Image (cartoon, helix red, strand yellow):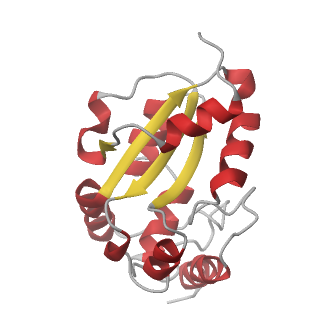
Amino acid sequence: MTFLSNQDIARKLESGKPIPAARAANHVQNWPGLYSIWIDNAANLPPPFSPILQENKTTLLYIGKADDLFARLIEQDLNHKNASTFFRGLGAILGFRPGRGSLIGKANENNYRFSDSDTAAIIQWIKEHILVRFAKVEIDRIKEAEKYAIKRRCPLLNTLLNPKKLKCLADLRLECRRVALLME
């Protein structure tokens, strides 16, 4: 594996031709690494998120790390086969809410899920509007490189490590958890 500096990794996540989410499974392998998730046009998000992206002159939504890029990016974040912070945050921004009481009795009260039909709608939206980039990174360097990339770009949907995390996003996620914990 070729050694890349944190700056080189961050540049790789920011430049070059992005891959549409609908075709990403054909390009991503089971490598360790980092990935970046972009929207095709900031105007495709509702306010206040589209103006925030436009003001920051970016379409970057999220930077993530993975021991296995295919499992994390393709299966979790883009297709929601397992719990995904990115997917939950995006769904909340797009106006979807989990089922009332759906988290009652669950071990992790943060991992709310959307209904099957809402999940399918979010996945379709992702296929139509999301682009990705990724970089193969040595497993022992992933955390350090992720921290550098997030602090450098402050992606909209990253809450951990992000010095500019959004209160409006935190409020939406809290609303989703509250709905999912309400008795019917």
Percent across and percent down for residue 181 are 60, 80
Q: Is residue 158 left or right of residue 83?
A: right
Of residues 57 and 128, the one nearer the viewer is 57
Q: Is residue 24 left or right of residue 61?
A: left
Percent across and percent down for residue 95 are 40, 82
Which residue is most to the top? Answer: 1
Q: Is residue 75 left or right of residue 26?
A: right
Q: Residue at x 31, y 37 (%)?
A: 24
In this view, 4 is above or below 2: below
In this view, 175 is above or below 151: below
In this view, 43 is above or below 21: below
Percent across and percent down for residue 120 are 27, 62
Using the rendered image of the protein, determine whether residue 79 is visible from the camera's viewpoint.
no
Q: Residue at x 76, y 36 (%)?
A: 144
Q: Residue at x 61, y 24 (%)?
A: 137
Look at the image and tell me in which quarter the N terminus lies.
top right
Percent across and percent down for residue 101 are 53, 80
Q: Residue at x 32, y 28 (%)?
A: 27
Of residues 28 and 7, the one nearer the viewer is 7
Of residues 20 and 85, the one nearer the viewer is 20
Using the rendered image of the protein, determine whether residue 12 is visible from the camera's viewpoint.
yes
Total numbered badges shown on the rendered structure: 0
Q: Is residue 101 left or right of residue 125?
A: right
